[in-house]
Amino acid sequence: MRTFVTVAILVLISLETMAQGQIKIAKMKYDGGGDWYGNKTALPNLAQFCNQYMRTNLDTDDEVVEVGSPDLFLYPYVYLTGHGNVVFSQNDAQNLRNYLIAGGFLHIDDNYGLDQFIRLEMKKVFPELEFVELPFDHPIYHQQFKFPNGLPKIHEHDGKPAQGFGLIYEGRLVCFYSYESDLGNGWEDQIIYNDPQSKRQEALRMGANIISYAFTQ
């Protein structure tokens, strides 16, 4: 198992390397049978939106990284989504914990049905932490785009309000959990879900805020 110092050095090296070219973001692959592979056009569209409206230099490829892989440290932002079961091995949980403590950022996006599984698995990563609902004045809602009422509701599902939760480690938000919002579906190509353009813009703007926050906190 890597020491904290080694992990921190790995993250610093990867960030320095990315600064010389395009920054890569990735979707997280996990075990358990859940559909980690969903929302295939989501991250490429979000990256393109950020590049256009925030002058970022994000790679628009649909990158995938396994939760237990050392390659996780190549990505300053990682996106996890799905509808079903999620299972982290002991190695997965330790690798993800090291990554987040060392400066990485995880965005969990409930694609409806993920909640009961992901909360249990994140307890393996941070047994000492609980998800807390972020207040509407949290900086993640007030980056380039303003969301005074918090997380936007993109898909109705069962009608519950959208909520944004976080895991906060030593004062830093290391994981943002968008619940009952389904941001990723709003990032997808319009032909896939035929969301109104206004909803797609809400989703993309909130996604851009998350990216901005993850890269500057």
Image (tube, helix red, strand yellow):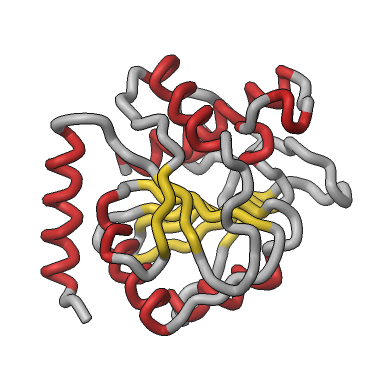
Tell me which residue sits at (25%, 61%) in the image: 102
**Which of these two is toward me, 193 or 149?**
193
Q: How many numbered discs, if any? A: 0
Tell me which residue sits at (40%, 39%) in the image: 213
Q: Quadrant of residue 182?
A: top right
Q: Is 183 left, or right, of 195 in this rendering?
A: left
Task: Estimate the x, y position of residue 113 in percent, counting from the top left.
Answer: 75, 61
**Eyeballing the image, is 193 above or below 161?**
above
Task: Estimate the x, y position of residue 13 in percent, counting from the top left.
Answer: 12, 50
Task: Estimate the x, y position of residue 120 in percent, counting from the top left.
Answer: 60, 77
Q: Is 173 left, or right, of 135 in this rendering?
A: left
**Eyeballing the image, is 74 above or below 48?**
below
Tell me which residue sits at (38%, 42%) in the image: 25
**Eyeballing the image, is 140 above or below 48?**
below
Task: Estimate the x, y position of residue 42 in percent, counting from the top left.
Answer: 57, 36
Tell me which residue sits at (45%, 39%) in the image: 62
Picture quarter with the N terminus = bottom left
Report the residue that reaches farthest toward the right: 158
Picture quarter with the C terminus = top left
**Eyeballing the image, is 143 above or below 89?**
above
Q: Is 21 left, or right, of 137 in this rendering?
A: left
